[in-house]
Amino acid sequence: MHTNAEKAVEVKGFSFWYRGSESPALDSLDLEVERGRFVVIMGESGAGKSTLANSLNGLIPHFVRGRYEGSVTVGGLSARETPVSRMAREIGLVFQDFEAQLFSTNAGLEVAFGPENFGVPRPEIALRIGDVLRTVNLEGFEGRHPATLSGGQKQRLAIGSVLAAHPSVLCMDEPTTDLDPMGKVEVFSIARRLSAQGDLTLIIIEHETEEALHAERLVLMKKGRILADGTPGDLLRDAALVAEAGIRPLQVPQYFAALNVCPAEELPLLPDEGAELFRSKGLSLDDARCRELSERDAARERSYGEAVVEVEDLSHVYPNGGTAVSGVTLSIRQGEFVAILGHNGSGKTTLVKHFNGLLLPSGGRALVRGRDTAKHSVFEIGKEVGYVFQNPDHQIFADNVFDEVAFSPRIRGCSAEEVASRVTEALEAVGLQGYEKRDPFTLGKGERQRVAVASVLSARPGVIILDEPTTGLDYGEQRRMMELIRKLNEAGQTIIMITHTLWVVAEYAHRIVAMRGGRVVMDGPTRQVLAREEELAASHLRPPHIVSLGNRLGRTVLSVEELVRCTRMPDMPKNGHSPQNAAGSAERGDA
């Protein structure tokens, strides 16, 4: 690192305690970032990442009070002593909840807001609007109301509105949370472009390890301290360190570490490098083992029951004339676990809202257990199909967890004993026994998500729809949420899940329905769809690294554990066994 370079950010001995908290959110933190650098900060929930971001521009301590020790300096200004309005010229912050910072009536005005407040002349503001919207790929959207944009477009607008003020430091807190895989790539390519200009310092807080590879420097945080600081490649090759930080391991090095075929510092990071090493080490894939995977998929498919949700030639046109879904026909059977994929704005959420009567078809029809949703109330259909929204706060409203989970059985006229029994059953299913008296709004995001799932489970629907169930959760929380959903599916629930997180799809979903432009463009078993990488790319989708590695080797695998089990070492007999301990450790994610 260039220690003599000009410092954009300097944090010295910084500790911060939120009011009412006995332990510090940040604990004696020391961090320096040179001007023009591109740094990614990672860590599990509670590591202190967002606290650090909010301290850089002075939101802490000016708006969020607490005990503050040490110093935070950005561009030579003390964040503690400088008003936020002045700090905003030096550092732009894109919040994790990016929608909260969009408030103007159109995209052009949103971008103009910062420069207007800083007294930038009108002709210069007009130039900045055009320049910024081009940078974030929203050219031509000047007149669009932010509320009419897709999640990914809103996220890019939030980035643009901050960029327009021409800050010397741009800090983005989880900027790719709601984006499809190609949208994530887009944000990081914007970040790389900005970084290449050399005068903007970029600090990105991120959960996705694959995206962190784009940065010059990676800082891992844990419990308010810096756990490690170095190049992304060096840190992400260290499986023990990644596990300690509570972030998702990169799959390619995780696979080769499980096989123990090369020193840790030589582990490949990406699928192409992995395929090269695989061949150079004389490794091969066991045909019989690979066939077992396909046979297991086929057996599972034969076990499904009758159709529970059917749509026939379904179309939906919104009141503004926009066609969101066009000519979709599909059938989902009892016991399936279906992932609905597609880029932001492809029609996924509009489609699934027809599965429980929240929306009615403009053309065609939707049937739930043979009943036409247009002829039955949402209340009736809701007995069969539960819906967990992307943001749990959009459906949580009660003062305590018990009342939240009890709401559905109560409005369905269940007795007090039945209500209590269902609440207990639902909270046990999501691992929240003992939370009955807790205020749901004081819980973490992952726990609120589980409360929302429990409130749906208490109605005992046969089908559960989950819209982005892992958004905003760290890796451990994502795993816990998905294991819960898998258990529900194995217990007989039909699961329909909208998600952008492709490793979750690969490891948990049985079937993929991919959408583009309101139409279904791919529909089939997960393994078969993930083999079609070029077609996926056309729908803004990218398979996880381990799937891409398997595809390069001629077989589609869905997890590190599957590829370990199917790998034959050069000295192994045909149909020999891969080391079971390696497969086991890969499955646990601690290889």
Image: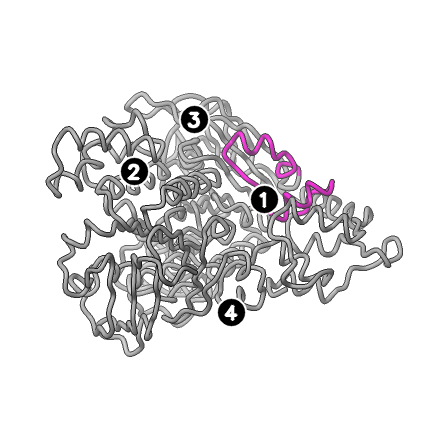
- Residue 583 spot, x, y in % from top left: 70, 61
- Residue 193 spot, x, y in % from top left: 40, 40
The answer to whether the residues at label 1 and label 4 have Cβ atoms under 8 Å apart is: no
**Which numbered mark, 3 or 1, is in the foreground of this view?**
3
Q: Earlier in the sequence, mark 4 or mark 3?
A: 4
Most extreme residue toward the bottom is 22
Residue to which mark 3 is pinned: 325
Q: Nearer the viewer, residue 241 or 323?
A: 241
- Cα separation between marks 1 and 2: 37 Å
Q: Secondary structure at mark 4?
A: helix
Residue to which mark 4 is pinned: 244
Q: Secondary structure at mark 3?
A: strand
Mark number for residue 529?
Answer: none
**Which numbered mark, 1 or 4, is in the foreground of this view?**
4
Q: Over which residues does the magenta segment extend? A: 528-557
Q: Is residue 20 above or below residue 10?
A: below
Residue at 26% x, 73% y: name it. 17
Mark number for residue 336?
Answer: 1
- Cα separation between marks 4 and 3: 44 Å
**Which numbered mark, 2 or 3, is in the foreground of this view?**
2
